[in-house]
Each structure stands twice: as C-alpha cells, then as structure tokens.
Amino acid sequence: MVMLENAHGLRAEIAQRGAALAGMWVPDRDGQFADVVLGHAEQSQRTSGRSFFGASIGRVAGRISTAGFVLDGQHHRLDSVDGLTAHHGGPDGFDARDWQWLGVRRDRARLQLVSPHGDQGFPGALTVTVDYRLDDTDTLHVDYAATCDRPTVVNLTHHPFWNLAGEGAGVVDAHLLTLPASRMVALGAALTPTGQRPEVAASAFDFRRARAIGHALSAAGDAQLQVAGGLDHYWILDAPADAGVRPAARLQDPHSGRVLDVLSDQPGVQVYSGNFLDGSLQGASGRPYHARAALCIEPQAYPDAMNQPAFPDITLQPGAVYRNRIRYRFSKDTQ
C-alpha cells in the first residue's frame, strides 16, 4: 500500500492489487475526516474474490454481449464465467492483478500492467499505466494510458464505491446526484446494451438537476430499474468528449456537507448503485455492505461498443495512445 497526502491533510491509499484506490480520507464541513470509499477489512479479502472496490478495470469495462466480438474480420471468443457475457475484462481482469510500481512520491504514484496477447481472449499485447496524483486543490487525478502491438479494443475505467457520509455509514439514498446528460443507454435482460439511447426526461434516470438517489430508485414500474435491480447504466454526457476534461457528475451528502465533483474526458459515465452488495462483504468499519451502501461513477467509453455498430469505436491501433483522464474534486457545502 502507498499513502498519498496533500497540504490540507487529504489522503489517498493506493493498492498494488488492481491499482486500486483503497481509501480516501476527506473532511466534512466541520473538518472531521472520514474514509469515503468502500474497502476491505483485511488484505486477504482483496486477493480472494472480486469486489472491484476502487479498482482499475480492463481490458474492457462493463459487459460484452455474447462474450465475444469481431475485429478486422476475426472473431475473438472471450473468457467468461457464464458463457453469455464477459464482465469487466473477464474472470481474471485487471482488477485481479498485481500491478508494478513505477514510481512513488508524497503526492503521486505510477503503476503499470502488461497484458499479453490472448489475455482473457483479447488480441494484442497491451501496456497500461495509471498515474495517481493528489494536489492541493483537493483533487485526485487518475490518468490512464495504454499502447498495443496489434489492433485491439480498450475501454478502461476506475471503480471506487463512494459514500460521502463515510465508509460503512449506511445507504446513500439521501446523497444528491447530478449528471449533465440528456440521454442514457438502455439495457436488455443480460444487462448489455440494446443499442437504444433514450432521453432521460421525465424518467427515473433524469439527474440533470440534483436529485436524491433514493427518490430516483423509488420510481414504481420503471422497466430499466427493474432489469438492473437499481442503477447500472451508462449516461451520455451532453458535452462532447473532444471538449476535453469537463464536468461529468456531482455527488453531495447533505448531512456531512462533503461534495465530490467528477470530471472526465470520456463520452459518458457508468453509474452503479451497488445492487449486488448483499451483506456478505464487511468493510474496514466492521459493518457489512448491503445494496446501495455506495455509488460508483465510472467514466468510460460506451459499453459493448465493439458489438454496437452505432456506438463510437473503441479500437486501439499500434502507434496510437489510449487515454482516460479522471478528476475527483472534493469540496464542502457549508450550509
């Protein structure tokens, strides 16, 4: 583990397994610090099973329909648990690997992972780096870069489970979420995209103005909430990706006053309400994690893009550099 710290006392704990954000200590409106990401109580839990807590996800985040895809006329069958979809890079995704430390300083750390050709069924060797930096504007920078030796597909993301009231503090139903997105990606029964991009207006998925998560999840009869058991969907940001790093989400906890702004250069964000947390995992607080114990906001490209002709391409060519730049900016609502 490596601990980063800034001049204001904010701390970010980085783990080698999964190049993960294992802890993030942020003050509330009264100056009291708390860890605001879910994490494991014991190191042994991090290396057994997959929770994705704070992890770097790849080679392709989300679910890939049919557990395969065609690239340059060749079909690639991916490793899969159920044979129907490949999830978060496969059964041995990047979150389950020990990354290599390349450099550590007080406020920053760099890690690298080399994924060989054929890893989990994906073509091409892929070299990935992630740079963490905690600056004195109370912003945690997470920057991914990747290169390949032959054409492949890449869609990395970062997977912290946020609870701004503090890890183990209960459900996040009272948290307020804002997403500057007028459209989302609809899901089918296998939780893979249908290809449809409906407008969010007048639906449970309209977060263009700050809205309590619990209020949205209480929408009766919403078919998309029912198919996913909550939020597990992709929102398409209104500002185009070529606008660079721009606001992607805001999460607020009215009780503590903590505010998280997420900025990204990706076309959208996947938002997940911890639907599969069932109380079997116990956190650092000693309390079990149940559904809605946190919210994930995952900047990334469109899910299942290689199987959706209408979605932007995620193919990476040799000589090109894939990048995903994420900013987590912390502040306080003093009211």
Image (cartoon, grey):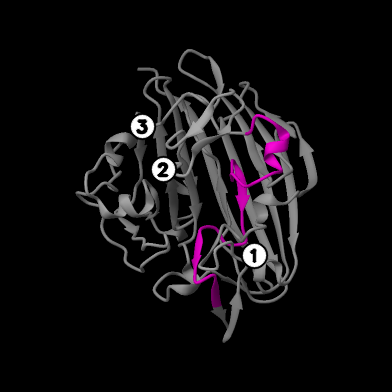
Q: Which residues are magenta?
A: 40-69
Q: Amino acid at mark 3?
A: Asp
Mark 1 vs mark 2: in front: 2
Q: Amino acid at mark 2?
A: Ala
Which of the two residues, 322 or 114, is positioned nearer the viewer here? 114
Mark 2 vs mark 3: in front: 3
Distance between mark 1 and mark 2 Cα atoms: 26 Å
Q: Which residue is mark 3?
A: 173
Q: Which residue is mark 1?
A: 321
Q: Quadrant of residue 60?
A: bottom right
Q: Which residue is mark 2?
A: 249
The C terminus appears in which quarter of the rendering?
A: top left
The N terminus appears in which quarter of the rendering?
A: top right
Does 67 appear above or below 108? below
Q: Position of residue 19 (x, y in %)?
A: 69, 45
Does 27 appear above or below 139? above
Task: Tell me the residue at 33%/51% (across/down).
Answer: 181
Q: Position of residue 74 (x, y in %)?
A: 60, 84
Q: Earlier in the sequence, mark 2 or mark 3?
A: 3
Q: Earlier in the sequence, mark 1 or mark 3?
A: 3
Q: Earlier in the sequence, mark 1 or mark 2?
A: 2
User: In the picture provided, is 162 more to the left or to the right than 58?
Assistant: left
The local secondary structure at tag 1 comes to loop
